[in-house]
Structure formats: C-alpha cells, structure tokens
Amino acid sequence: MKLIIISIILIGLAVVLLALRLIVKGDKNPQSSHIEDSKALKKRGIGCANKQMAELATRQNLADRMADDPQ
C-alpha cells in the first residue's frame, strides 16, 4: 500500500513540475515535429510520405497504380 501511495505522489509531483515548467517558460511557439518543418530533411529532399503518395497518385493513371499495387 505504501508503494502505491509513494508512486502516486511521485507521478503527481512530476505532472505538477512539468505544468509549472510550461507556465514559467511560456513557450509560445513550440517546435513542430512534423517532417515538413525540418530544414535538415528539406535539404536532403525528404518530405511527408502522405504528400509523396498523393503526388504519385495524381501522376499515375489507374492502370499503372493497379499494376504497382502489391496486393
């Protein structure tokens, strides 16, 4: 029982400290983790897989897409 209480207190303390850090630091513009926003990946020509698939679908006709489908 003591272990559960100590665990709950530690988790609660961690949550409170994280919330205080966000409030005090006040990061108005958090960094985006989206692949499109990474300068290093843009330099390498790496983009979002969803956009690449959409571009590929618009360039190929239905017969070509059916031939490429592994199913």
Image (cartoon, grey):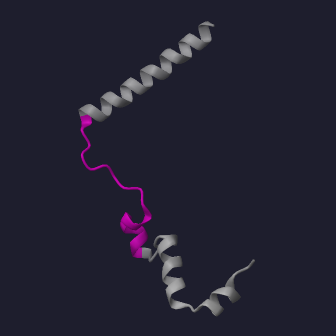
Query: Residue at horizontal 44%, vertical 64%?
Result: 35
Task: Indicate the quadrant containing the C terminus: top left, top right, bottom left or bottom right.
Answer: bottom right
Quarter of the rendering containing residue 42 = bottom left
- Between 5 and 42, the one lying in front of the other is 5
Task: Indicate the quadrant containing the N terminus: top left, top right, bottom left or bottom right.
Answer: top right
Query: Residue at horizontal 42%, vertical 26%?
Result: 15
Quarter of the rendering containing residue 27 = top left
Query: Residue at horizontal 53%, vertical 84%?
Result: 56
Query: Residue at horizontal 46%, vertical 73%?
Result: 47
**Number of callouts:** 0
Residue placed furthest toward the right: 71
Residue placed furthest toward the front: 62
**Residue 2 is inside the magenta segment:** no
- Left or right: where 36 falls relative to 2: left
Q: From the viewer's perspective, is residue 9 above or below residue 41? A: above
Q: From the viewer's perspective, is residue 16 above or below residue 23? A: above
Report the span colored magenta. Answer: 25-43
Percent position (x, y) of residue 17?
37, 25
**Residue 42 is inside the magenta segment:** yes
Percent position (x, y) of residue 49?
52, 71
- Left or right: where 32 falls relative to 68: left
